[in-house]
Amino acid sequence: MAKKLKIGDVIRGYRITKVFGPGMMAISYAAQAPTGRKVFFKQYKSPAPTVVWYRDFVAYQKELSARVVRGKADNFAVAQVDAFEEIWGGPCYFQAYTFVENGADLQQVLDKEREQHRLTGRTPTSDPAVWGRHATWAKVLVAAIGALHDVKVVHADLKPANAYLIEDPTIAAEYQLKLIDMDFSVLADRRPPWHGHQGYVGTDNFRSPEHLVKGAVPGLASDVFTCGLMLYELLAGRHPYWSEDQADYARLVQGYKAEPPALLGEMPWPASNADVSAALHRCLSPDPAARPTAAQLRATLSGRDRKPPVAIVPPKPTVAVPPRTTEPTPSKVPAKPATARPAPPVARTPLASNAIELVAPTGKSLRLAVRTELGKMLMRQFGADAEFWDERQCVIERNASGQWIAVPVATALNQTLVNGRALTVSRSLSQGDLIAVGNEAKGVAKLPLAVRAA
Protein backbone atom coordinates (compact mmCIF):
# COMPACT_ATOMS: atom_id res chain seq x y z
CA MET A 1 0.00 0.00 0.00
CA ALA A 2 1.35 3.45 -0.95
CA LYS A 3 2.25 5.82 1.88
CA LYS A 4 1.87 9.58 2.21
CA LEU A 5 4.85 11.79 1.37
CA LYS A 6 6.36 14.11 3.96
CA ILE A 7 8.28 17.39 3.71
CA GLY A 8 11.83 16.58 2.61
CA ASP A 9 10.93 13.32 0.87
CA VAL A 10 12.34 12.97 -2.65
CA ILE A 11 10.76 10.87 -5.37
CA ARG A 12 11.96 10.86 -8.98
CA GLY A 13 13.96 13.98 -8.17
CA TYR A 14 10.94 15.90 -6.81
CA ARG A 15 11.57 17.17 -3.27
CA ILE A 16 8.41 17.80 -1.21
CA THR A 17 8.39 21.31 0.33
CA LYS A 18 4.82 21.57 1.59
CA VAL A 19 1.85 19.28 2.23
CA PHE A 20 -1.53 20.79 1.33
CA GLY A 21 -3.54 17.83 2.54
CA PRO A 22 -5.63 15.01 1.14
CA GLY A 23 -8.48 15.56 -1.26
CA MET A 24 -11.13 13.11 -2.39
CA MET A 25 -8.93 11.47 -5.04
CA ALA A 26 -5.37 12.64 -4.35
CA ILE A 27 -2.97 14.19 -1.85
CA SER A 28 -1.55 17.55 -2.95
CA TYR A 29 1.93 18.96 -2.30
CA ALA A 30 4.28 21.75 -3.29
CA ALA A 31 7.55 20.35 -4.57
CA GLN A 32 10.83 21.38 -6.13
CA ALA A 33 11.44 19.72 -9.49
CA PRO A 34 14.88 18.37 -10.50
CA THR A 35 15.30 21.59 -12.52
CA GLY A 36 14.73 23.68 -9.38
CA ARG A 37 11.31 24.76 -10.59
CA LYS A 38 8.44 24.90 -8.10
CA VAL A 39 5.58 22.54 -9.04
CA PHE A 40 2.20 21.42 -7.80
CA PHE A 41 2.55 17.71 -7.07
CA LYS A 42 -0.28 15.15 -6.79
CA GLN A 43 -0.18 11.64 -5.38
CA TYR A 44 -3.26 9.65 -6.37
CA LYS A 45 -5.23 7.63 -3.85
CA SER A 46 -7.88 6.77 -6.44
CA PRO A 47 -7.71 4.95 -8.70
CA ALA A 48 -5.40 2.56 -6.93
CA PRO A 49 -3.29 0.35 -9.23
CA THR A 50 -5.42 -2.62 -8.16
CA VAL A 51 -8.69 -1.36 -9.68
CA VAL A 52 -9.73 -2.72 -13.04
CA TRP A 53 -9.77 0.67 -14.81
CA TYR A 54 -6.46 1.99 -13.42
CA ARG A 55 -4.38 1.34 -16.58
CA ASP A 56 -7.04 2.94 -18.79
CA PHE A 57 -7.12 5.94 -16.44
CA VAL A 58 -3.38 6.53 -16.91
CA ALA A 59 -3.79 6.41 -20.70
CA TYR A 60 -6.83 8.71 -20.47
CA GLN A 61 -4.81 11.23 -18.47
CA LYS A 62 -2.07 11.17 -21.09
CA GLU A 63 -4.57 11.96 -23.86
CA LEU A 64 -6.22 14.67 -21.75
CA SER A 65 -2.85 16.38 -21.17
CA ALA A 66 -1.96 16.14 -24.87
CA ARG A 67 -5.22 17.81 -25.89
CA VAL A 68 -4.85 20.67 -23.43
CA VAL A 69 -1.52 21.75 -24.92
CA ARG A 70 -3.09 21.97 -28.38
CA GLY A 71 -4.31 25.33 -29.63
CA LYS A 72 -5.53 27.99 -27.20
CA ALA A 73 -6.49 25.58 -24.40
CA ASP A 74 -2.90 25.70 -23.17
CA ASN A 75 -3.34 29.42 -22.39
CA PHE A 76 -6.12 28.75 -19.89
CA ALA A 77 -5.24 25.46 -18.21
CA VAL A 78 -2.42 24.74 -15.79
CA ALA A 79 0.23 22.79 -17.73
CA GLN A 80 1.13 19.28 -16.71
CA VAL A 81 4.94 19.01 -16.61
CA ASP A 82 5.28 15.34 -15.64
CA ALA A 83 3.32 12.15 -14.90
CA PHE A 84 4.74 8.82 -13.80
CA GLU A 85 4.19 5.67 -11.77
CA GLU A 86 6.49 4.87 -8.87
CA ILE A 87 6.74 2.69 -5.80
CA TRP A 88 6.35 4.58 -2.52
CA GLY A 89 5.53 1.94 0.02
CA GLY A 90 3.47 0.52 -2.84
CA PRO A 91 2.75 1.35 -6.49
CA CYS A 92 1.26 4.81 -7.02
CA TYR A 93 0.50 7.32 -9.79
CA PHE A 94 1.93 10.87 -9.59
CA GLN A 95 1.46 14.09 -11.58
CA ALA A 96 3.31 17.41 -11.51
CA TYR A 97 1.85 20.69 -12.73
CA THR A 98 3.03 24.26 -13.12
CA PHE A 99 2.60 25.96 -9.75
CA VAL A 100 0.17 28.90 -9.88
CA GLU A 101 0.69 31.73 -7.42
CA ASN A 102 0.64 35.56 -7.19
CA GLY A 103 -3.13 35.48 -7.21
CA ALA A 104 -6.19 33.78 -5.80
CA ASP A 105 -9.06 31.67 -7.03
CA LEU A 106 -12.27 33.40 -8.07
CA GLN A 107 -14.10 32.24 -4.95
CA GLN A 108 -11.49 33.91 -2.73
CA VAL A 109 -11.62 37.08 -4.80
CA LEU A 110 -15.42 37.28 -4.64
CA ASP A 111 -15.41 36.60 -0.88
CA LYS A 112 -12.86 39.40 -0.37
CA GLU A 113 -14.94 41.79 -2.47
CA ARG A 114 -18.08 40.99 -0.52
CA GLU A 115 -16.30 41.71 2.75
CA GLN A 116 -15.02 45.03 1.39
CA HIS A 117 -18.51 45.90 0.18
CA ARG A 118 -19.91 45.06 3.62
CA LEU A 119 -17.42 47.42 5.25
CA THR A 120 -17.60 50.26 2.71
CA GLY A 121 -21.15 49.96 1.41
CA ARG A 122 -19.85 49.93 -2.16
CA THR A 123 -21.04 47.31 -4.63
CA PRO A 124 -20.32 46.50 -8.28
CA THR A 125 -23.37 48.64 -9.07
CA SER A 126 -21.84 51.69 -7.40
CA ASP A 127 -18.21 50.92 -8.23
CA PRO A 128 -17.53 50.99 -12.00
CA ALA A 129 -14.03 49.56 -11.51
CA VAL A 130 -15.39 46.41 -9.81
CA TRP A 131 -18.10 45.99 -12.41
CA GLY A 132 -15.54 46.43 -15.20
CA ARG A 133 -13.39 43.65 -13.74
CA HIS A 134 -16.38 41.32 -13.41
CA ALA A 135 -17.45 41.91 -17.02
CA THR A 136 -13.89 41.22 -18.21
CA TRP A 137 -13.50 38.09 -16.07
CA ALA A 138 -16.82 36.79 -17.42
CA LYS A 139 -15.59 37.06 -21.00
CA VAL A 140 -12.20 35.52 -20.18
CA LEU A 141 -13.87 32.64 -18.30
CA VAL A 142 -16.07 31.82 -21.27
CA ALA A 143 -13.08 32.10 -23.62
CA ALA A 144 -11.22 29.59 -21.44
CA ILE A 145 -14.09 27.11 -21.51
CA GLY A 146 -14.46 27.59 -25.24
CA ALA A 147 -10.76 26.80 -25.73
CA LEU A 148 -11.20 23.52 -23.83
CA HIS A 149 -14.29 22.66 -25.81
CA ASP A 150 -12.45 23.29 -29.09
CA VAL A 151 -10.27 20.24 -28.28
CA LYS A 152 -13.27 18.24 -26.95
CA VAL A 153 -12.33 18.53 -23.27
CA VAL A 154 -15.08 18.90 -20.66
CA HIS A 155 -13.81 20.38 -17.40
CA ALA A 156 -16.73 18.69 -15.57
CA ASP A 157 -16.10 20.40 -12.19
CA LEU A 158 -16.37 24.12 -12.88
CA LYS A 159 -16.79 26.37 -9.87
CA PRO A 160 -15.25 29.67 -8.70
CA ALA A 161 -12.64 27.80 -6.65
CA ASN A 162 -11.35 26.12 -9.83
CA ALA A 163 -10.79 29.38 -11.71
CA TYR A 164 -7.46 30.84 -10.57
CA LEU A 165 -6.72 34.52 -11.23
CA ILE A 166 -3.02 35.38 -11.55
CA GLU A 167 -2.18 39.08 -11.27
CA ASP A 168 -0.63 40.36 -14.50
CA PRO A 169 -0.46 44.18 -14.88
CA THR A 170 0.99 43.83 -18.39
CA ILE A 171 -2.39 42.91 -19.93
CA ALA A 172 -5.62 44.89 -20.12
CA ALA A 173 -7.57 42.38 -18.02
CA GLU A 174 -4.92 42.71 -15.25
CA TYR A 175 -5.25 39.00 -14.51
CA GLN A 176 -4.54 35.74 -16.29
CA LEU A 177 -7.13 33.04 -15.73
CA LYS A 178 -6.15 29.40 -15.29
CA LEU A 179 -8.62 26.54 -14.88
CA ILE A 180 -7.39 24.03 -12.31
CA ASP A 181 -8.37 20.61 -10.91
CA MET A 182 -8.81 18.89 -14.27
CA ASP A 183 -7.52 15.41 -13.40
CA PHE A 184 -11.05 14.00 -13.63
CA SER A 185 -12.08 16.06 -16.64
CA VAL A 186 -13.84 14.24 -19.48
CA LEU A 187 -13.00 13.79 -23.14
CA ALA A 188 -16.21 14.63 -24.97
CA ASP A 189 -15.61 11.99 -27.63
CA ARG A 190 -14.34 9.18 -25.40
CA ARG A 191 -16.15 7.56 -22.48
CA PRO A 192 -14.14 7.85 -19.24
CA PRO A 193 -12.69 4.58 -17.91
CA TRP A 194 -14.36 5.08 -14.54
CA HIS A 195 -17.86 5.18 -16.08
CA GLY A 196 -19.99 2.55 -14.38
CA HIS A 197 -17.43 2.10 -11.60
CA GLN A 198 -17.81 5.41 -9.78
CA GLY A 199 -19.63 8.71 -10.25
CA TYR A 200 -18.40 11.91 -11.84
CA VAL A 201 -16.56 14.53 -9.81
CA GLY A 202 -18.71 17.53 -8.95
CA THR A 203 -19.21 20.10 -6.21
CA ASP A 204 -22.27 20.95 -4.14
CA ASN A 205 -24.28 23.80 -5.70
CA PHE A 206 -22.30 23.55 -8.95
CA ARG A 207 -23.50 20.27 -10.43
CA SER A 208 -25.18 20.27 -13.82
CA PRO A 209 -28.43 18.38 -14.46
CA GLU A 210 -26.31 15.65 -16.07
CA HIS A 211 -24.33 15.25 -12.83
CA LEU A 212 -27.62 14.66 -11.05
CA VAL A 213 -28.89 11.84 -13.29
CA LYS A 214 -27.54 8.37 -12.63
CA GLY A 215 -25.73 6.99 -15.66
CA ALA A 216 -25.52 10.35 -17.48
CA VAL A 217 -22.11 11.60 -18.64
CA PRO A 218 -21.25 15.31 -18.23
CA GLY A 219 -20.69 16.84 -21.66
CA LEU A 220 -19.78 20.19 -23.17
CA ALA A 221 -23.24 21.54 -22.34
CA SER A 222 -22.68 20.57 -18.68
CA ASP A 223 -19.76 23.00 -18.51
CA VAL A 224 -22.01 25.70 -20.00
CA PHE A 225 -24.55 25.08 -17.22
CA THR A 226 -22.00 25.43 -14.40
CA CYS A 227 -20.39 28.35 -16.19
CA GLY A 228 -23.84 29.97 -16.22
CA LEU A 229 -24.01 29.67 -12.43
CA MET A 230 -20.61 31.39 -12.17
CA LEU A 231 -21.69 34.14 -14.56
CA TYR A 232 -24.80 34.79 -12.46
CA GLU A 233 -22.46 35.40 -9.52
CA LEU A 234 -20.12 37.63 -11.51
CA LEU A 235 -22.67 39.71 -13.40
CA ALA A 236 -25.79 39.55 -11.21
CA GLY A 237 -24.19 39.19 -7.79
CA ARG A 238 -26.03 36.03 -6.80
CA HIS A 239 -26.11 32.27 -7.24
CA PRO A 240 -29.62 31.45 -8.52
CA TYR A 241 -29.83 27.97 -6.94
CA TRP A 242 -27.65 28.08 -3.83
CA SER A 243 -28.96 25.78 -1.09
CA GLU A 244 -27.55 24.04 1.95
CA ASP A 245 -29.83 21.13 1.06
CA GLN A 246 -28.59 19.46 -2.14
CA ALA A 247 -31.93 17.74 -2.68
CA ASP A 248 -33.46 21.21 -2.78
CA TYR A 249 -30.69 22.32 -5.15
CA ALA A 250 -31.50 19.41 -7.48
CA ARG A 251 -35.20 20.30 -7.41
CA LEU A 252 -34.45 23.92 -8.37
CA VAL A 253 -32.07 22.88 -11.15
CA GLN A 254 -34.38 20.31 -12.69
CA GLY A 255 -37.40 22.63 -12.32
CA TYR A 256 -35.60 25.50 -14.13
CA LYS A 257 -36.59 27.86 -11.33
CA ALA A 258 -34.06 30.60 -12.18
CA GLU A 259 -35.23 33.91 -13.64
CA PRO A 260 -33.31 35.92 -16.27
CA PRO A 261 -30.92 37.98 -14.14
CA ALA A 262 -30.83 41.75 -13.75
CA LEU A 263 -27.17 42.65 -14.32
CA LEU A 264 -25.35 44.85 -11.80
CA GLY A 265 -23.96 47.16 -14.48
CA GLU A 266 -23.97 47.95 -18.18
CA MET A 267 -22.15 45.45 -20.39
CA PRO A 268 -19.45 47.16 -22.47
CA TRP A 269 -20.62 48.11 -25.96
CA PRO A 270 -21.55 46.49 -28.27
CA ALA A 271 -22.93 43.80 -25.92
CA SER A 272 -26.52 44.20 -24.75
CA ASN A 273 -27.69 43.61 -21.18
CA ALA A 274 -30.94 42.10 -22.47
CA ASP A 275 -29.08 39.68 -24.74
CA VAL A 276 -26.61 38.69 -22.00
CA SER A 277 -29.38 38.16 -19.44
CA ALA A 278 -31.33 35.94 -21.84
CA ALA A 279 -28.19 33.92 -22.71
CA LEU A 280 -27.34 33.36 -19.03
CA HIS A 281 -30.86 32.12 -18.43
CA ARG A 282 -30.58 29.69 -21.36
CA CYS A 283 -27.35 28.33 -19.85
CA LEU A 284 -29.43 26.94 -16.98
CA SER A 285 -31.94 25.06 -19.10
CA PRO A 286 -32.36 21.45 -17.91
CA ASP A 287 -32.22 20.48 -21.60
CA PRO A 288 -28.57 20.43 -22.75
CA ALA A 289 -29.63 21.06 -26.36
CA ALA A 290 -31.33 24.33 -25.34
CA ARG A 291 -28.16 25.80 -23.86
CA PRO A 292 -25.87 27.99 -25.95
CA THR A 293 -22.41 26.68 -26.82
CA ALA A 294 -19.40 28.31 -25.19
CA ALA A 295 -18.64 30.00 -28.53
CA GLN A 296 -22.19 31.38 -28.79
CA LEU A 297 -22.07 32.59 -25.18
CA ARG A 298 -18.75 34.31 -25.80
CA ALA A 299 -20.17 36.06 -28.87
CA THR A 300 -23.11 37.34 -26.81
CA LEU A 301 -20.89 38.63 -23.99
CA SER A 302 -18.73 40.52 -26.49
CA GLY A 303 -21.66 41.69 -28.63
CA ARG A 304 -20.28 40.05 -31.77
CA ASP A 305 -23.55 38.27 -32.49
CA ARG A 306 -25.68 41.41 -32.52
CA LYS A 307 -27.33 42.31 -35.80
CA PRO A 308 -27.47 45.98 -36.81
CA PRO A 309 -30.93 47.49 -36.63
CA VAL A 310 -32.69 47.70 -39.96
CA ALA A 311 -34.15 51.11 -40.70
CA ILE A 312 -37.54 50.94 -42.38
CA VAL A 313 -37.81 53.79 -44.84
CA PRO A 314 -41.44 54.57 -45.66
CA PRO A 315 -42.30 54.85 -49.35
CA LYS A 316 -42.49 58.33 -50.76
CA PRO A 317 -46.08 59.57 -50.90
CA THR A 318 -47.66 59.69 -54.32
CA VAL A 319 -48.38 63.28 -55.33
CA ALA A 320 -51.67 63.56 -57.16
CA VAL A 321 -51.40 65.59 -60.36
CA PRO A 322 -54.54 67.65 -60.98
CA PRO A 323 -56.13 67.26 -64.40
CA ARG A 324 -55.20 69.86 -66.97
CA THR A 325 -57.83 72.51 -67.59
CA THR A 326 -58.29 74.89 -70.44
CA GLU A 327 -56.11 77.95 -69.94
CA PRO A 328 -58.24 81.07 -69.44
CA THR A 329 -57.69 83.88 -71.87
CA PRO A 330 -55.19 86.53 -70.73
CA SER A 331 -57.93 89.12 -70.54
CA LYS A 332 -59.72 87.15 -67.80
CA VAL A 333 -56.62 86.49 -65.58
CA PRO A 334 -55.52 89.39 -63.42
CA ALA A 335 -51.85 90.02 -63.46
CA LYS A 336 -50.00 88.78 -60.32
CA PRO A 337 -47.62 91.13 -58.60
CA ALA A 338 -43.98 90.13 -58.81
CA THR A 339 -42.75 88.36 -55.63
CA ALA A 340 -39.27 87.36 -54.50
CA ARG A 341 -38.49 83.70 -54.92
CA PRO A 342 -37.44 81.80 -51.75
CA ALA A 343 -33.73 81.09 -51.45
CA PRO A 344 -32.81 77.57 -52.56
CA PRO A 345 -31.98 75.15 -49.71
CA VAL A 346 -28.31 74.77 -48.80
CA ALA A 347 -26.90 71.70 -50.55
CA ARG A 348 -25.95 68.85 -48.20
CA THR A 349 -23.08 66.62 -49.26
CA PRO A 350 -23.18 63.24 -47.50
CA LEU A 351 -19.90 62.35 -45.82
CA ALA A 352 -18.11 59.40 -47.39
CA SER A 353 -14.77 59.64 -45.58
CA ASN A 354 -12.95 56.68 -44.02
CA ALA A 355 -13.77 58.03 -40.56
CA ILE A 356 -15.74 60.79 -38.90
CA GLU A 357 -15.49 62.63 -35.59
CA LEU A 358 -18.23 63.69 -33.22
CA VAL A 359 -17.12 66.89 -31.50
CA ALA A 360 -18.65 68.07 -28.22
CA PRO A 361 -19.00 71.77 -27.30
CA THR A 362 -15.96 71.35 -25.01
CA GLY A 363 -13.82 70.37 -28.00
CA LYS A 364 -13.48 66.76 -26.92
CA SER A 365 -14.10 64.40 -29.81
CA LEU A 366 -14.90 60.78 -30.56
CA ARG A 367 -13.49 59.21 -33.73
CA LEU A 368 -15.59 56.57 -35.50
CA ALA A 369 -14.22 54.33 -38.24
CA VAL A 370 -16.62 51.38 -37.91
CA ARG A 371 -20.28 50.84 -37.12
CA THR A 372 -20.84 52.27 -33.63
CA GLU A 373 -23.86 52.20 -31.36
CA LEU A 374 -24.12 55.46 -29.43
CA GLY A 375 -25.52 55.33 -25.93
CA LYS A 376 -25.12 56.51 -22.38
CA MET A 377 -21.95 54.57 -21.57
CA LEU A 378 -20.06 55.92 -24.58
CA MET A 379 -21.35 59.47 -24.11
CA ARG A 380 -20.31 59.78 -20.47
CA GLN A 381 -16.85 60.90 -21.54
CA PHE A 382 -18.49 64.16 -22.74
CA GLY A 383 -20.15 65.14 -19.47
CA ALA A 384 -23.19 64.85 -17.23
CA ASP A 385 -25.72 65.40 -20.03
CA ALA A 386 -24.90 61.88 -21.20
CA GLU A 387 -27.55 60.74 -18.69
CA PHE A 388 -30.22 61.99 -21.12
CA TRP A 389 -29.01 59.44 -23.69
CA ASP A 390 -30.52 55.98 -23.63
CA GLU A 391 -28.39 52.85 -23.21
CA ARG A 392 -28.97 52.33 -26.96
CA GLN A 393 -29.80 55.67 -28.56
CA CYS A 394 -28.79 55.46 -32.22
CA VAL A 395 -26.33 53.82 -34.58
CA ILE A 396 -23.71 55.54 -36.74
CA GLU A 397 -22.53 53.46 -39.67
CA ARG A 398 -21.73 53.53 -43.37
CA ASN A 399 -24.26 52.43 -45.96
CA ALA A 400 -23.59 50.39 -49.09
CA SER A 401 -22.46 53.55 -50.89
CA GLY A 402 -19.87 54.31 -48.22
CA GLN A 403 -21.80 57.30 -46.86
CA TRP A 404 -22.08 57.83 -43.12
CA ILE A 405 -25.65 57.56 -41.85
CA ALA A 406 -27.49 57.83 -38.53
CA VAL A 407 -30.01 55.10 -37.72
CA PRO A 408 -32.53 55.55 -34.86
CA VAL A 409 -33.15 52.91 -32.21
CA ALA A 410 -36.90 52.62 -31.78
CA THR A 411 -36.72 51.75 -28.07
CA ALA A 412 -34.84 54.92 -27.05
CA LEU A 413 -36.74 56.97 -24.46
CA ASN A 414 -35.72 60.41 -25.77
CA GLN A 415 -35.66 61.39 -29.42
CA THR A 416 -32.42 61.37 -31.36
CA LEU A 417 -32.12 64.79 -33.00
CA VAL A 418 -30.19 65.70 -36.13
CA ASN A 419 -30.03 69.47 -36.57
CA GLY A 420 -32.94 69.77 -34.13
CA ARG A 421 -35.24 67.42 -36.04
CA ALA A 422 -36.30 64.03 -34.68
CA LEU A 423 -34.54 61.12 -36.36
CA THR A 424 -37.29 58.66 -37.30
CA VAL A 425 -35.64 56.88 -40.23
CA SER A 426 -32.03 56.47 -41.27
CA ARG A 427 -30.50 59.55 -42.90
CA SER A 428 -27.14 60.53 -44.32
CA LEU A 429 -24.80 62.78 -42.34
CA SER A 430 -23.04 65.85 -43.67
CA GLN A 431 -20.21 68.03 -42.43
CA GLY A 432 -21.43 70.22 -39.56
CA ASP A 433 -24.59 68.24 -38.71
CA LEU A 434 -25.46 68.26 -35.01
CA ILE A 435 -26.48 65.01 -33.32
CA ALA A 436 -28.18 65.35 -29.93
CA VAL A 437 -30.98 63.89 -27.81
CA GLY A 438 -34.07 65.69 -26.62
CA ASN A 439 -37.53 66.67 -27.80
CA GLU A 440 -38.14 68.35 -31.14
CA ALA A 441 -41.56 69.75 -30.18
CA LYS A 442 -40.20 71.42 -27.04
CA GLY A 443 -36.98 72.58 -28.66
CA VAL A 444 -34.85 70.68 -26.12
CA ALA A 445 -31.48 69.29 -27.27
CA LYS A 446 -28.93 67.77 -24.90
CA LEU A 447 -25.22 67.17 -25.52
CA PRO A 448 -25.06 68.24 -29.20
CA LEU A 449 -22.18 66.67 -31.10
CA ALA A 450 -20.94 68.19 -34.35
CA VAL A 451 -20.17 65.84 -37.23
CA ARG A 452 -16.98 66.34 -39.21
CA ALA A 453 -14.77 64.27 -41.49
CA ALA A 454 -11.75 62.80 -39.71
Image (tube, rainbow, N blue to C red):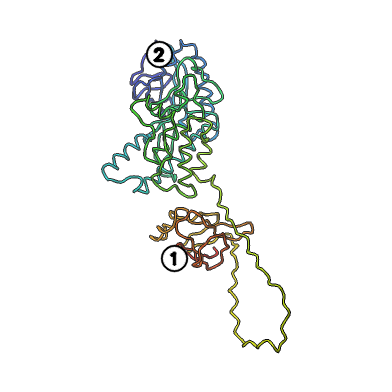
Outermost residue, left direction? 119
Compared across the picture, whether 59 is left or right of 131 comes to: right
The residue located at (50%, 24%) in the rendering is 186
Rendered location of residue 454, percent (x, y): 54, 63
Q: Is residue 215 above or below residue 370?
A: above
Mark yes or no: residue 82 visible.
yes
SS state under label 1: strand
Mark carried by residue 88: 2
Q: Which residue is mark 1?
A: 445
Q: Tell me, yes or no, if residue 102 can be seen here.
A: no
Name above or below for residue 337 compared with residue 366.
below
Which labelled disc corresponds to residue 186? none
Answer left or right for 298 relative to 28.
right
| Kind of residue sitting beneath label 1 | Ala
Q: Amino acid at mark 2?
A: Trp
Residue at (45, 21) in percent of width and height: 200
Question: Between residues 238 and 318, which one lies in front from this camera angle?
Answer: 318
Q: Nearer the viewer, residue 168 or 267?
A: 267
Instruction: Between label 2 and label 1, give the one nearer the viewer.
Output: 1
Q: CA distance from mark 2 to mark 1?
A: 79 Å
